[in-house]
Image (cartoon, helix red, strand yellow):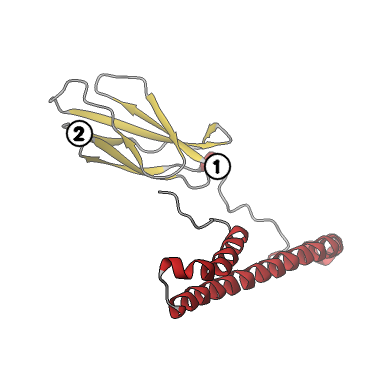
Amino acid sequence: MADFLPSRDGDTLIWLKNFSDKLPGHQKDLGLTDAQVKSMQGSCDQLSSAITANQKKQAEYQSQIAATNAVRESALPGLRAGIRLIKAQPGFAQKPAIGPDLGIVSTTSQLTTAQHQVTGSAEVQRGRVRIQFRKGPFDSVNVYARRPGQVEWTFLARDTHTPYDDCTPLAQPGVPETREYRLIGVCKDQEQGLPSDILHVTCSG
C-alpha cells in the first residue's frame, strides 16, 4: 500500500512544511483542538530539524571525502617515489626483513579465484530443496543438478544471494528420488574456481 509520506528527505521537508502551514486552516472543519494542532506542528518541526541536520552532516562528509581524495592524489605519488628509492638501496636487498617490517612488499598469500571453491549444503524442505552456499570472492554461483541415471549436469540457475530453492517436482509423483547438486563460482559472467563438493539429498515430494 502506497504511503502519503515521500521517501526522499528533500521531498519530506517540503511535505512537512506544507502540512504544518496549512493544518490550522482546516482545524475548525476537522474539529481539532489547539493542543492537537500544536502537537502535530511540533512533530513536523522536530522531524524537519533532524532531517536538516542530517543533510548538513552528509554535505560535510562529502566535502571531507573530496578533500581526503585530493590529499591522497597529492601525497601518494611522492610517497611511492620514496619507497622506490628505499627498495633501490643496497641495504634493502641485504636485509630482506626490512620490506615486511615497513609493509612495503606485496603479499601473495591471498588465493586467486581459480583456487577457490564454493561451499554449500542442501536440505529437503516441503516442496523444495533449499541450497545454502558461500560464494566467497565470486560475484554469484551457478547451480547444477543431476538425477539418478543422469550423467550430465543440468543447469538450474545463477544466484547471487543464498539460499537457492529448487522447486523441481519429482520425476514420478510419489516416488522418492535421490538428487545431486553442484555449485560453481562465477565472476564477470564466467565460471571460475573449483566446483563444490557434490551435495546429495533424497526427495520424497
- 39 over 142 or under it: above or below: below
- 176 over 65 or under it: above or below: above
Which image quadrant for residue 66?
Answer: bottom right
- Most foreground residue, 115 or 45: 45
Q: Is residue 32 left or right of residue 82?
A: left
Tell me, yes or no, if residue 169 can be seen here.
yes
Tell me, yes or no, if residue 95 can be seen here.
no
Q: Residue at x 42, y 66 (%)?
A: 30
Q: Residue at x 15, y 28 (%)?
A: 176
Q: Amino acid at mark 1?
A: Thr
Q: Which mark is residue 186?
A: none
- The image quadrant where one finds the C terminus is top left
Q: Which mark is residue 202?
A: 2
- Most foreground residue, 63 or 31: 31
What's the distance in space between the residues labelled 1 and 2, CA to CA?
Answer: 32 Å
Sequence-first tag of 1 and 2 = 1
Residue 178 image position (x, y, % from top left):
21, 29
Q: Amino acid at mark 2?
A: Thr
Residue 161 image position (x, y, % from top left):
43, 44
Q: Residue at x 65, y 56 (%)?
A: 107
Q: Secondary structure at mark 2?
A: strand
Residue 148 image position (x, y, % from top left):
24, 23
Hey, which residue is sitting farthest bottom in the picture?
Answer: 35
- Judge depth for marks 1 and 2 and give the one in front: 2
- Most foreground residue, 104 or 29: 29
Q: Residues within 10 Å of mark 2 (few under 14, many from 20)?
A: few
Hey, which residue is sitting farthest front in the picture?
Answer: 28
Residue 179 image position (x, y, % from top left):
26, 30
Q: Is residue 166 left or right of residue 108?
A: left
Q: Secondary structure at mark 1?
A: helix
Which image quadrant for residue 163?
Answer: top left
Residue under label 1, please give it. 113
